[in-house]
Image: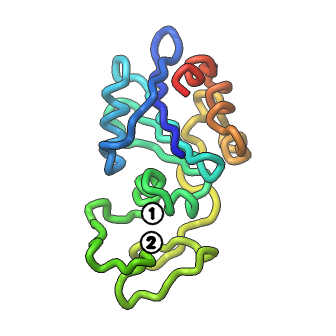
Amino acid sequence: MYFAALLARTEDGWEASDTELDNVETLTDLADLAREAAVDDDTVVALLEQEDAWFGVVRVDGDDDPRIFVSNAAAAARSSYGSLLTDELLGRDETVEDDLDSLDLDGTEDGEPERDDEAEANTDNGSPTPAGPLGDAGLLDDLGVGEKELLALDGDALSEIADALGCTDVLEAVR
C-alpha cells in the first residue's frame, strides 16, 4: 500500500495534503502537482512510501528542478510510483512504454529469461539499480534533516521527517 503527501511551506509553518498519484505518470507530473500546492513559490516536499519497503522524498523549490532521494532504489524500482523516482535518478527515458502484448503470463517478455526475485532490478542500459539509498541525501539539510539522519531512517521514516520539520500534526491529519 502506498502513502503520498505534499508538505507546502508557508509563512505560518507547513500545510499538508493527501496526494492521489493516480494521474501521475512522470516525475514532471509529480513536480507540477507539488508546484500547484506551493504557497508563493515556496518549498514543497512530496513524501512517498510503500509500507516498510522504501520511502522517497521529492523537494520542489519554485521553478528549480526537483531534488530526489529514495531510501532503497532496488525496492522502489519494482513499484510503479517508486520507479518514477528511480527512473529519473538513473537516467531512464520516461517516455518508453511497456509493450503489454509481448508479455508472457509470468510477466517476462517473449524470449527473455525469467529474473531471479533476489536479483537487483536493471536499468534499460543494463546497469544495476543500487539496493540502497539513491539520490540527493542532503535535500533536507536546510530544513532540519541532515544527510546522515536521512540515510539512517527506517521504519516510520515519514513521521520522523515530519517531526524534524515541525509538522507531525499536519502530516498525521492526512494519513
Q: Amino acid at mark 1?
A: Leu
Instruction: Identify the coloring.
Output: rainbow
**Which residue is disc 2 drawn over?**
123
Q: Quadrant of residue 80?
A: bottom left
In the image, what residue occupies the spot 37% across and 23% down?
38
Residue 96 x %, y %? 28, 66
Q: Are marks 1 and 2 in contact (CB under 8 Å)?
A: yes
Which class describes the residues within 10 Å of circle 1: few (<14), some (14-19), or many (20+)? many
Residue 99 in percent (x, y) is at: 27, 73
Which is more N-terminal, label 2 or label 1? 1
Secondary structure under the numbered disc 2 in the rendered image: loop
Q: Is residue 98 left or right of residue 59?
A: left
Vertical position of residue 61 compared to residue 138: above or below: above
Quarter placement of the C terminus: top right
State the separation of the CA atoms marked 1 and 2. Answer: 7 Å
Check disc 1 and report the residue beneath it.
Answer: 90
In the displayed structure image, the side of residue 162 where residue 63 appears, left or right: left
Numbered mark located on residue 66 in the image: none
The answer to which quarter of the image holds residue 103 is bottom left
Crowding at label 2, few (<14), some or many (≥20) Cα neighbours within 10 Å? some
Q: Secondary structure at mark 1?
A: loop
The structure residue drawn at horizontal position 37% and vertical position 65%, both measured from the top left corner, is 92
- Vertical side of 74 occupied by 61: above or below: above
Nearest-to-viewer mark from 1 and 2: 2
Mark 2: which amino acid?
A: Thr
What percent of the width, then of the height, locates residue 128? 53, 74
Most foreground residue, 144 or 4 = 4
In screen coordinates, is 168 left or right of 30? right
